[in-house]
Image (cartoon, rainbow, N blue to C red):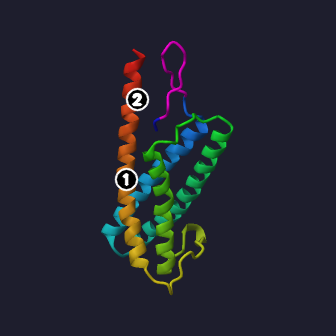
Amino acid sequence: MSMAMPKSGAGTTAALPLPLVAQVLHWLTAALVLALFGTGVMMKQLGEGALADLLHLCHKTTGAVLLCLVLVRIGYRLFAHLTRRWQKGAASRPVHALLYLGLLVVPLLGWAGTSSFGARQLLFGLSLPEIWSQEAGHADLLLTSHAWLAFGLIALVVVHIGVALGDYLTRGSKAD
């Protein structure tokens, strides 16, 4: 995650560390996105069967948790920005905006697709509310869009990592 560098006097810059809450939310999100991508690819490769069904349940449950976590992150980020605990301009990079958009749209498309398909069950006897009726159809289109956008989200994650590494390397060379 790259952040704007505040001036610290005499023409030098110093990086403010991300608050611990933001770091925890960031890395939890990263772990869930990677787990979801891995299970999504495995489910598709397995096709049908008991293991594929279990992976579907785990995938949908984890996707619901991710959506809730992203909403918490957005709320925290807005709160931290309003209380001046967040660096001004830290959220202005287009890659961050696209990441947050993807982190909202991909799970919502999966939820709509599973609603349309009629497979809203989660682990622990839980069930997702219906957000797209089965009668409306389009389960295949929604789930295919979900899959393609998930690949796009992973590409954005790679770009995000590249930007963060570039910022880190640039910041490190300026400190010398």
Q: Position of residue 22 (x, y in %)?
A: 57, 40
Nearest the eye: 42 or 88: 88
- Main secondary structure of the magenta stretch: loop
Q: CA distance from mark 1 to mark 2?
A: 21 Å
- Left or right: 125, with 29 as reference point: right
Q: Position of residue 111 (x, y in %)?
A: 51, 70
Position of the C terminus, as image quadrant, is: top left
Residue 79 x %, y %: 66, 44
Is residue 38 something that shows in the picture? no
Q: Secondary structure at mark 2?
A: helix
- Which numbered dot is residue 140? none
As displayed, is residue 15 above or below residue 122? above
Q: Which residue is mark 1?
A: 154
Queried whether the magenta region covers residue 124, the answer comes back as no
Q: Is residue 67 left or right of residue 146?
A: right
Q: Which residue is under mark 2?
A: 168
For the magenta stretch, what is the residue range?
3-16
Q: Nearer the viewer, residue 34 or 19?
A: 19
